[in-house]
């Protein structure tokens, strides 16, 4: 049983003390930091906290690695591909450090929580001064301070580095600083960790047990985002549908949606990710009855085969998933539906893969994120026999992608001739369609219009579409 561990105000104060000490240390000249993020939105959100800490420690932020006095890499462990990119890019920092020996290199996030990665960093990546797991983010200033001290006072090279990633079920920390990106869209993390233990997934092993923030803390943050003029708020959690479990209160996820939706302000409310096993009628009704809530749900199916779903420990089968989709669409007829799919789970047969294809044809997703199975050390699936070759999996993957793309293009074509309310979120490099925007359902729109519309809602006439986007003009 997970025992909730909350960071106390006194512990936070201690961290602020470290910020001050670092600020004093950096006072001789301006110092700059760069934060690079891999992986999911939860990681983007963690990087905002990291930037918040760095600024409190006296750093300015930069996008230019050549200017940086500190480079922090926030890593993802969900697939091997992401890990290899991190190792490649961190290894490449050797050149920068050769030019600037004072450069501090910090590696944080999910990869660092794995013992195999710690070992590799220790042995093969002397360029890394500080490695810290996801459970250490709340005490980043202390770790940075200790890293600075070690670099100055330890003689042996191996002692100059710090690897902090204690085994932990995770903590709940309120009041951490946060440097948000832009003033239009905001992440709002409502919970952390995961208790589902899908057999392929490393997340529960690195991010710890599922723990929800208190509703009053989430609501206070949502109110301050609305008051600051944010137009698009995305609630984040590994499985938002089980929000509130373990808090002992009466606020579950549908209730939280309604309460945030009641906050005054003109904003769209989104959330991700939902586990299909917990996506209930109550949730879809709350979405329908909460005017601000986007009619979009990301509902990762992972496979269309009930046998494979059981082996994945997903707690639903093909029929139950299809029933959930039908129910959702009966309550929200204009629902935008997106999903994740894994191709080539160990032991998956061609016939089982074809069940996934047929489910995709039946559901017709607006967009899909497809992945080839990647074995993760320490997960149960990694120990299963996996007789299908990588090349064969690639052929399956390509077939799936072809269906996904065709269906997305067809779905997008249905928008042509319609007028949608969109939020303009930036400018593009294309003079003909100079603005980028999102529909309430989250579809990307390239628009021609006045750049003064950035940060505002506008009506857009959709004139054209492709697999990836809609095109039109502001009206
Ligand atoms: N291999 C491939 N894809 C994975 N995902 C999670 N773990 C793995 C893995 N070991 C995918 C799932 C999940 C998404 C975030 O990443 O589809 O929904
Ligand atoms: Fe991984 Fe499953 Fe948790 Fe998603 S729900 S993070 S796939 S264990």
Image (cartoon, helix red, strand yellow):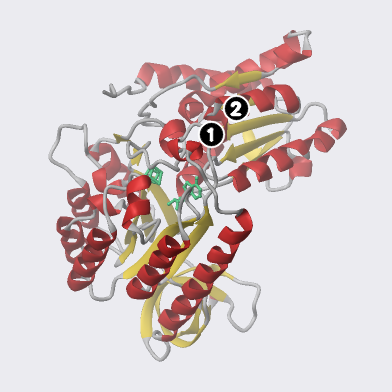
Please identify the quadrant where the N terminus is shown.
top left
Q: CA separation, marks 1 and 2?
A: 8 Å
- Tell me which numbered mark, 1 or 2, is placed earlier along the sequence: 2
Q: Residues within 10 Å of mark 2 (few under 14, many from 20)?
A: few
Query: Which label belongs to residue 426?
Result: none
Residue 191: x and y in percent read 33, 39
Q: Residue at image x 49%, y 19%?
A: 166
Look at the numbered discs 1 and 2 and tell me whether their residues touch, using CB distance below 8 Å.
yes
Q: Which residue was labeled with disc 1?
A: 377
Residue 465: x and y in percent read 50, 84
Q: Residue at image x 56%, y 38%?
A: 51
Residue 73: x and y in percent read 63, 38
Q: Is residue 326 visible?
A: yes
Observer-nearest of 426 and 190: 190
Q: Residues within 10 Å of mark 1 (few under 14, many from 20)?
A: some
Q: Which residue was labeled with disc 2?
A: 116
Determine whether 405 is above or below 157 in the image. Answer: below
Give the residue at the far bottom of this rendering: 417
Q: Residue at image x 25%, y 51%?
A: 277
């Amino acid at each position: 049983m997970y025992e909730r561990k909350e960071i106390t105000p006194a512990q936070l104060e201690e961290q602020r003390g470290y910020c001050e000490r670092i600020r004093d240390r950096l006072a001789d000249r301006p110092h700059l930091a760069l934060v690079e993020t891999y992986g999911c939105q939860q990681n983007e959100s963690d990087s905002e906290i990291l930037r918040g800490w760095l600024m409190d420690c006296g750093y300015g932020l930069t996008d230019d690695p050549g200017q940086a006095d500190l480079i922090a890499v926030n890593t993802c462990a969900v697939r091997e591909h992401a890990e290899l990119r991190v190792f490649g890019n961190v290894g490449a920092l050797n050149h920068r450090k050769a030019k600037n020996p004072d450069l501090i290199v910090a590696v944080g996030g999910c990869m660092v929580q794995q013992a195999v990665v710690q070992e590799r960093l220790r042995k093969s990546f002397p360029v890394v001064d500080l490695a810290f797991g996801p459970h250490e983010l709340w005490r980043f200033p202390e770790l940075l301070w200790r890293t600075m001290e070690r670099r100055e006072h330890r003689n042996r090279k191996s002692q100059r580095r710090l690897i902090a990633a204690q085994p932990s079920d995770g903590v709940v920390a309120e009041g951490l600083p946060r440097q948000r990106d832009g003033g239009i869209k905001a992440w709002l993390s409502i919970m952390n960790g995961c208790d589902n233990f899908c057999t392929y997934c490393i997340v529960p092993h690195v991010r710890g047990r599922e723990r929800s923030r208190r509703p009053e803390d989430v609501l206070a943050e949502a109110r301050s985002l609305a008051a600051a003029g944010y137009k698009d708020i995305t609630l984040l959690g590994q499985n938002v549908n089980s929000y509130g479990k373990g808090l002992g209160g009466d606020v579950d996820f549908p209730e939280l949606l309604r309460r945030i939706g009641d906050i005054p302000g003109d904003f769209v409310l989104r959330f991700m990710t939902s586990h299909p096993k917990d996506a209930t009628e109550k949730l879809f009704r709350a979405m329908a009855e909460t005017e601000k809530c986007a009619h979009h749900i990301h509902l990762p199916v992972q496979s269309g085969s009930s046998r494979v779903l059981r082996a994945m420990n997903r707690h639903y089968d093909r029929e139950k998933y299809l029933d959930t989709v039908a129910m959702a669409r009966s309550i929200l007829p204009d629902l935008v539906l997106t999903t994740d799919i894994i191709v080539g789970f160990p032991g998956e047969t061609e016939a089982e893969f074809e069940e996934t294809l047929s489910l995709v044809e039946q559901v017709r997703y607006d967009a899909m994120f497809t992945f080839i199975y990647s074995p993760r050390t320490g997960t149960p699936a990694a120990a299963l026999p996996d007789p299908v070759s990588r090349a064969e999996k690639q052929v399956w993957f390509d077939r799936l992608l072809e269906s996904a793309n065709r269906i997305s293009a067809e779905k997008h074509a249905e928008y042509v001739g319609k007028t949608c309310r969109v939020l303009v979120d930036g400018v593009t490099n294309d003079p003909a369609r100079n603005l980028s925007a999102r529909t309430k359902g989250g579809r990307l729109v390239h628009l021609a219009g006045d750049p003064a519309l950035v940060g505002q809602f506008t009506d857009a006439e959709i004139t054209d579409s492709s697999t990836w986007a809609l095109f039109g003009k502001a009206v």
